[in-house]
Image (cartoon, rainbow, N blue to C red):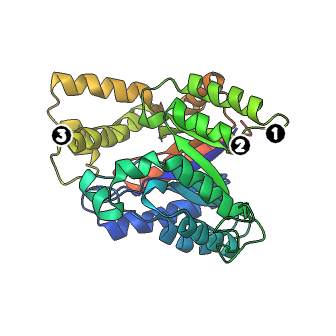
Amino acid sequence: MKLSILDQSPISTGKTSRNALNASVDLARLGDELGYTRYWIAEHHDFSGLACPNPDVMLGIIGAQTEQIRIGAGAVLLPHYKPYRVAETYNLLATLYPGRIDLGIGRAPGGSAEASMALSGNFLENVRHMPEKLDELLQFLLHDFAKNDMYAKIRPTPVPEILPQPWMLGTSEKSAIVAAERGLPYTFGHFMTDQDGPSIISTYTEKFARQHPGKTPEKMAAVSVICAETTDEARDLALSGHLWSIQRDKGVGDGKVPTVSEAKNYAYTDKEKERLQKMMHKQVVGNPQEVTQQLEQLQALYGVDEWMIVTITHSYEARKKSYELIAKAMLESGC
């Protein structure tokens, strides 16, 4: 089973955006050392508590400080951008870091309606044109326009020897079908939705096989994981992220990830306690043996080739330790 890292670049209480971004660079270096397959960083706009609005800039820095791990966006929110500009950017990264660049593609706004308007105008209209934008992006990357097309004579330079690898990201059957129809690898956001992930992955696999016989689909799922030396410690660490989600949705607090002490001493309402139980059920939490067992159980349900792990803790050191423990339990042991 291959393991990868999805980093949302969270800002913890008492820390700054610069601290969060530096911690992201440290995490990418650690993933490189530990043998994780890829490191992706997410895109968010005016999103309190998350520090990265522009994965492209971070990837330029991270690529220079890592050696083998694949790096990419999780994801470029394509409705906001012109495909040619995206192709130029990722061709440039692929030229600098050959054979290591992934181009994750998503359709979410990544922020409020106001932030979306400020960034790209009418987001809903842009989303409506997402399929055409995706096709145009792939044509630019592959230089696959018809001879009489207005874009046939231009290239998104520099053109790398090894092209960036596009991935489609999503949480719905619609995104899975879009990926399958175009023969793209697909990542399902298990941690982001209550949708039936295994069914969606199955739809992707079946439709891919019909559309592209003889070609093997690549499929991955992103899951929230907290691993610590003991079960109790892991559960305590997970509380920070849970309270962060509750406060964020209520619009209270400063948007930063609270401490474990704050999360343990918070006066949860009955409704919030119910939500805590649902979040804990959705998340993989425990000691290394328990995390391994839970991921293996999910593997049996999903049948994916790779797990992309997202970990939100107040302590950046605890986050790194979580990835270290998982790597030791699953990568070094050959699970």
Residue positioned 43% across, 53% down in the render: 8
Report how far apart the C-alphas of labels 3 and 2 lie in the structure: 40 Å
**Quarter of the figure with residue 263:** top left
Identity, as a three-letter code, of the amino acid under mark 3: Lys
Classify the position of the N terminus by image quarter.
top right
- Label 3 sits on a secondary structure element that is helix
Which residue in the structure is indicated by mark 2? 183
Q: Nearer the viewer, residue 175 or 323?
A: 175
- Please, is residue 228 above or below residue 100 in the view? above
Q: Which mark is residue 93?
A: none
Q: Could you tell me if the residues under marks 3 and 2 are in contact, i.e. CB atoms within 8 Å? A: no
Residue positioned 53% across, 33% down in the render: 174
| Picture coordinates of residue 158, whole percent (x, y) | 68, 77
Mark 2 / mark 1, whichever is N-terminal: 2
**As drawn, is 185 to the left or to the right of 20?**
right
Q: Nearer the viewer, residue 112 or 297?
A: 112
Mark 3 / mark 2, whichever is N-terminal: 2
Classify the position of the C terminus by image quarter.
top right
Q: Nearer the viewer, residue 171 or 6?
A: 171
Q: Nearer the viewer, residue 156 or 92?
A: 156
Which residue in the structure is indicated by mark 1? 215
Identity, as a three-letter code, of the amino acid under mark 2: Gly
The residue carrying pointer 2 sits among few (fewer than 14), some (14 to 19) or many (20 or more) residues within 10 Å by Cα, namely: many
Residue positioned 29% across, 59% down in the render: 117
Q: Which mark is residue 250?
A: 3
Residue positioned 32% across, 66% down in the render: 17
